[in-house]
Image (tube, coloured by chain):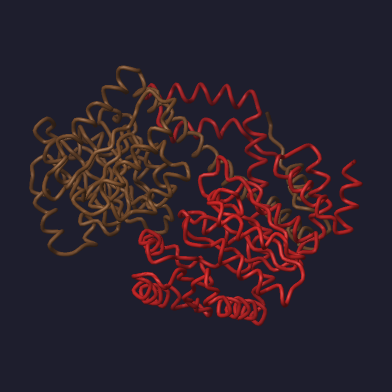
Chain colours: A red, B brown
Amino acid sequence: MTIKEYLKKFEEGDERALSKIITIIENGYEESKEILEYIGKRTGKAYRIGITGPQGSGKSTLIAKLAKRLLSKFKEIGIIACDPSSPFSFGALLGDRIRMNELFLEKGIFIRSMATRGSLNGLAYKTKEVADILDAFGKEIIIIETIGVGQVEVEISNLVDTTIVVFVPESGDGIQVLKAGLTEIGDIFVVNKSDRIGADILFYELKNLIEMSYQNSKWKPPVILTQAVNNYGIEELEKEIINHYNYLIENNLLEEKRKKAVIRELVNNFENEILKILWQSERVKKLFEKVVEEVWEKKITIEEGVKKLIKEVKYVK
Amino acid sequence: MTIKEYLKKFEEGDERALSKIITIIENGYEESKEILEYIGKRTGKAYRIGITGPQGSGKSTLIAKLAKRLLSKFKEIGIIACDPSSPFSFGALLGDRIRMNELFLEKGIFIRSMATRGSLNGLAYKTKEVADILDAFGKEIIIIETIGVGQVEVEISNLVDTTIVVFVPESGDGIQVLKAGLTEIGDIFVVNKSDRIGADILFYELKNLIEMSYQNSKWKPPVILTQAVNNYGIEELEKEIINHYNYLIENNLLEEKRKKAVIRELVNNFENEILKILWQSERVKKLFEKVVEEVWEKKITIEEGVKKLIKEVKYVK
């Protein structure tokens, strides 16, 4: 089949074409360009939810239960799993996988797991593009699961409309991350496995931290106690997602948030392209090597080296 | 005093001048340029050790004990603390602070704590520069303490010759980070507070993980059990640092590692400067705004937008 034919099937709602198209994009095949051009003009309808947290915090189960609930309101839900240990990714125990597989059989649910190979921050390389594809395909809700290890919370929150940060009573280090200044990333905080020892302490710790961090914010992120395996707290989680959605809409923040994401992506891609062109220049490469040697031999400082390099790269403004 | 006078005092070994010069660099004052030029040509003699790990893992105590030991071999030791909760940073309990202050009184030891404000990754903004200053001042050993939250382990390992990663039995999340692919950052692994429950399990988990991750590496990082408060394991830690130093020297890797760091810094600074110049252009800014609107209104895709921008920014090669 040609790309045109795949895209036609895609438009008709064929999930195999959807899978194929995701694979092409993930692998960066030649045909990507044509697909992205097609997709790029058809996005913006889906509501995107990010769920981040440490491995073993039960994110996948939480997503499974949440997705089942959302199915009563929405017909089309897409799930992207970027956690290599996620049951969605077949990285987990068989029992877990079977539990997740039930979800695969629900009509309207499409699950895709993505490799985080090479990515230090837990976010798979083409996550944004795959979310766009699901959006263009007609998914009304897109849930993105990522393992939270520091930086990734920031990146995921740039990709989605609502960011949910999941903790478990054991995740003391997670709280450390929050204290290090990452609180302002989450829109909703969840203490999962809340029947375990330490859940109450964590709950109040989070409450306090958030109260302090969001003093000047109009949105005060709720903290929710859940036990995903028992379906406990999922109703409240859904309610808070809707609350956050309403908050964004009422304050004209949804459009603003999404426009900021477009600007961020344009800046990143533009800068990457500029630098790519720069390093392709044989003249720049040669000059760079010369400057490295001069700095290494302490003939000039790094700063002087940079100046030398800049002088040689002029723009036509 | 003028900068010239400060630098003269600095050269004479005056610690007040050293402090002043660090402050100037940290705050990015105008005089920075002159100082960095002076410093840049006087570095490369000190051996740099990075110690990273979660808050509360006892890094500061470990450093204090290690520094005391090293004092029998080296006369000049510098310590840079980037953990806001570190006793060095006065973020901790009074008892801890008093314990640390003993170290301040030792001749030859200079301790500087740095703010990690605004930095998401736990590494203070000018850490590299401050290490260079201590190096130029004549410190033979420089120990840099950072709180490890994901990405930072990578950055610290770029700055130092030997990277020590500290865990405590409670730091389950830390292990998750390792599994996510960060093992190859550490040169020495420490399980501190090794009298606590779970230390043995963590020790063997680490051993296994490292064995797998370093299969193709000539250096097999040791895992050490320590109880810093009781001075237990510090001798072994010192021994392993020396082992790692010898390994680097015997394999000609010390120079290679440091040259790579120079290249990395040159690339970063050069690219940052290029982009700074780019965004200073009024024409680029105006064109960018236009492209943002076109992408936002879905007239063109991000990719087409980037192409439009690139076309307008030409280099003289």
- The x, y position of residue A68, in whole percent, is 66, 71
Residue B48 vs residue B175, the one in the foreground: B175
Quarter holding residue B191: top left
Residue B67 vs residue B187, the one in the foreground: B187
Residue drawn at 87 percent across, 50 percent down:
A7
Quarter holding residue A102: bottom right
Residue drawn at 30 percent across, 22 percent down:
B247
Q: How many marks?
A: 0
Residue drawn at 72 percent across, 77 percent down:
A72
- The x, y position of residue A226, in whole percent, is 49, 74
State whether residue A265 is above or below residue A66: above
Q: In this view, does A223 lie to the left or right of A5?
A: left
Q: In this view, does A298 lie to the left or right of B168?
A: right
Residue drawn at 70 percent across, 57 percent down:
A131
Q: Is residue B207 left or right of residue A132?
A: left
- The x, y position of residue B280, in whole percent, is 60, 50
Q: Dividing the image into 4 quarters, which one contains the N terminus of chain A? A: top right
Q: Dividing the image into 4 quarters, which one contains the C terminus of chain A? A: top right
Q: In this view, does A48 lie to the left or right of A304?
A: right
Residue B219 vs residue A214, the one in the foreground: B219
Residue A267 vs residue A90, the one in the foreground: A90
- The x, y position of residue A24, in whole percent, is 76, 42
State whether residue A188 is above or below residue A307: below
